Amino acid sequence: MASKKYKVELPAELRDEGYQEIKVSLLSKAGDPNAVDVAINGFVDALFNDDELKPIFEKYSKPHLKAHQQRLFLMAITDLPADFDYKSFIMERHYKLFDKGVNEKHFDLMVKYLNEALATLSVDPEIAGGINAHLAPFRDVFETTSPDDVKGYLKKSIGSLHMIRIAQAKRQREQEIEEHNRRASMGSTFSEQTDMKSEELG
């Protein structure tokens, strides 16, 4: 059983396979099989070329950053559940950004470049028009959250995750014991059947 890394996970439909479905949907409008990847590459290049954003991202390789921006790309055009915990999601995964002083102004720059990237795909106007609305809750997190808020959350979150992992390990151990007992029982039954056949033959 894999250990739980985060308290807040993306809905299953918005993980890697979800991105591929959205990608196919966009491609049906863009026409070019490589259009989405080209758009994301352009988006990442823009982040590295912006004087305000470059210091934030320059320590990351472009392939690494591209993988992360694919998810932002997806969330920009997709509805998340009404009860999705945006703040915890950001604090768990991107806590280092707050130490770097990232705020809503940096986020606005990213959204600007994201809009420009999506514009190259000739995305349906209805989808494009919803980008800012989809990303507004994320912007609010960067506008209202301080580094101290993040540190307090992580301290509490790490403790909770530790308890989750203990429970997972306990359950895994119980399953291993159950499996061991089941195999032992099967072995015992097989041994008894063998003894009975031996007696019959004798």
Image: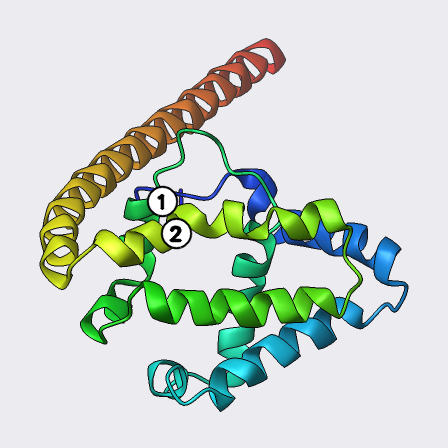
- The residue indicated by pointer 1 is 86
Could you tell me which residue is drawn at 67 percent across and 53 percent down?
A: 128
Q: Position of residue 19 (x, y in %)?
A: 65, 53
The answer to whether the residues at label 2 and label 1 have Cβ atoms under 8 Å apart is: yes
Q: Which residue is mark 2?
A: 138
Report the front residue among 186 and 68: 68
Identify the residue at image location x=61%, y=65%: 115
Q: Amino acid at mark 2?
A: Phe
Residue 156 - label: none
The one nearer the camera, 129 or 5, is 129
Quadrant housing the N terminus: top left
Other residues around mark 2 within 10 Å, as few (<14) / some (14–19) / many (≥20): some
Given residues 61 and 150, the one toward you in this image is 150
Mark 1 crowd level (few <14, some 14–19, many ≥20, 10 Å Cα): some
Left or right? Give the position of 95 relative to 77. Answer: left
The kind of residue on which mark 1 rests is Tyr
Nearer the camera: disc 2 or disc 1:
2
Residue 74 is situated, as x and y percent measured from the top left of the image, at 60, 54
Horizontally, residue 195 falls left or right of residue 7, namely right
Label 2 – label 1 distance at C-alpha: 6 Å
Residue at 85% across, 62% down: 30
The answer to whether residue 142 is above or below residue 134 is below
Left or right, residue 16 beside residue 102 = right
Q: Secondary structure at mark 1?
A: helix
Quadrant assignment for the C terminus: top right
Q: Is residue 35 above or below residue 201?
A: below
Q: Residue at x 23, y 76 (%)?
A: 100
